[in-house]
Image (cartoon, rainbow, N blue to C red):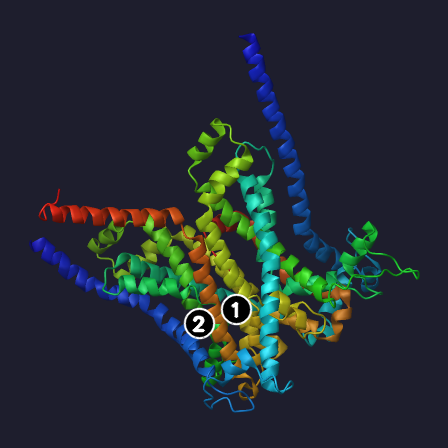
Amino acid sequence: MSKMSSVYGEAKANYTAKLKIKSAILFVWFVILTIICLFPIYILLVNATRTTTDISNGISFLPSTHLFENYKSATGADFRLNYRALYGYRNSLIITCTSCFLTVFFSALTAYGIHVYDFKLKETSYTIILLVMMVPMQVTSAGFLSFMSKIHLTNTYWPLIIPAVAAPGVVYFMRSYMKSSFPLDIVEAARIDGCSEFRTFVSIAIPMMKPAIAVQAIFAFIASWNNFYTPNMILISVDTKKKTLPMMINALQSSDVLNDYGAVYLAIAMSIVPIIIAYVLLSRFIIAGVALGGVKE
Amino acid sequence: MASAAQRRIKSISYAKYGYIFILPFFIVYLFFQLWPLINTFIVAFKGNADTGVDNWVGLNNFKDILFGNPDKPFTAAQTVHESFFRCLGNTVILWVGNFIPQIILSLSLAVWFTEANLKIPGREFFKIVMYLPNILTAASVAVLFVQLCGQSETNPGAINSLLSKVGIVKSLPNGHIDPIEFIDGIWPSRFVVMFIQTWMWFGNTMIMLMSGIQGINPSLFEAASIDGATSGQVFRKITLPLLTPIMAYTLVTSMIGGLQMFDIPYLYNKNGTVKESLETIAALIYKYFHVSDLSKSKLGYSGAASVLLFFITLALGCIAFYMTRDKDEIAKKKQRKKNEKQLKQQNKQFGGFSV
């Protein structure tokens, strides 16, 4: 009996030892991956504080003290031709906030319309929305641009904002969410209490869908903030003051200030840091959202 | 009876709200997505700057792109033919080079993150860090890597100086280092773009696969561990087969995304013009229509290339779905149909009575 238990104990100890070794190896591997993930961002932040000569002399892992000088030249006369951070923030925020609001509101409205009401084209319209999800943006862009220039909307923000109303992926997500957690009895109850249909949507459905709306709002915000393709396509010949932040970063590349490394690093950092801060605050939501099959660009 | 009738009246009177609520979506969709799609097909049959963007040219654009004009090497037709296939090749190379490492990395990480008996501290932290590159602005990331991978003798860039510290990159006698041409070299630059794509997307793929693994019935894993299966066996016999649908989804979305690959290859260069070895299909389409005056653009070529891209996407999607469909399910369906047929025949024999 005692022999049995010792054999069992040995096997168990063996098993746990193996698991411990595996866990330790994996931990080291994860740490390596973490370093790879953070290395470019860390170097970006460090180099944003170093002078151009320091940077061209080699790599350093410790920040320096020249942040303010770099800021001065990044907002100075040479950069001003292509890069104006404050205007960039403003323009990106205008486009991003409005399109994010439109995406979330109208997607919720569309999903609600399909989910709550019975009408003839209900299933057809939902199928169309699912099909539309598959068409990539790049395929339609030639026709999109030629249409926009025909109705004189190029070089304005409208073609960047209004299409946000029709976001099939978000509608699909909202509908799935409603199916699982929006009972139709509530709508009946609201009707009996004399609530109008639109008001039912605004003051009952939207508060109930807050989690789904939050996740999709975050993703819509990130996607729109990071978008370079569409703005660069539509805003063909506009002043630097009207460009979005990613467009300004792109403009830096073809300018001759690219040799002022410290200031360029700072300019890039200024475009990335706001979104990193937002990510750190909202990361739990975001990870949960991706796990729900949220988005894939 | 009355209540049924009332209910019917009610549902009829509410149906209009359904239409009203989905109307904005469909109006905007019609104007900003469906019509542009149709319009792309229309411009594909119209001319370019030299033949006039408003003139119909039939299938000429497609003919030029697919077959070119081999007798006259420097004409527009031959150029567009060569660049289309060069860009298609680039796109495939860049996509394969980022998808294979990405799926291996994400799948292994997803399995390790979900293995319950491993004791790894800080899993949540690792997940959050690994997803971080995905939310960064792609345009900024490309320019950042151009800076990091600098290669001139006077400015070796962070990566080259790190490699020289490790000893991979040799030093020159004059004290400068002999850098790897991460920007000008064809394969080194492709490698960097593949690295950036993998770096940005593996966290996203990992989390999707993880949610797929967590959706597998845990009692299967329990049963396997009671039966003494090793983690390799569990992976091959349980995780992988049950993960096939979500893997198919990942493959298809990644393929479609790969065909649209634009920001990183388009912006990874030093002087603002896209490098030939990195030009993707999306970048080519973009180049043809992205001019300040549309009547001077190669809108026809750009439309025709878009149409071809559309059909390539469609075909790839169909193939992927066909290859990864659930074979057991199909076999079962066939069996079920067979059984039904037999049953019907039997019923006929018994004079139409159902048994």
Foreground pick, A8 / B71: B71
- Which structural element holds mark 1? helix
Q: Residue at x 63, y 67 (%)?
A: B265
Q: Residue at x 35, y 48 (%)?
A: B331
Q: Is residue A143 left or right of residue B158?
A: left
Foreground pick, B118 / B80: B80
Q: Residue at x 61, y 23 (%)?
A: A14
On the image, the x and y values in percent for residue B188 come to 72, 62
On the image, the x and y values in percent for residue A272 come to 63, 60
Q: Residue at x 53, y 51 (%)?
A: B205
Residue indicated by mark 1? A94
Q: Which label sits on residue A162? A: 2
On the image, the x and y values in percent for residue A223 come to 52, 62
Answer whether labels 2 and 1 touch (C-beta < 8 Å).
Answer: no
**Labels 2, 1: one chain:** yes
Subunit of label 1: A
Q: Identify the residue at the far right of this view.
A: B173
Q: At label 1, which amino acid type do we have?
A: Ile
* B76 over B314 or under it: above or below: below
Q: At label 2, which amino acid type do we have?
A: Ile
Q: Identify the residue at the far top of this view.
A: A1
Q: Identify the residue at the far front of this view.
A: B349
Subunit of label 2: A
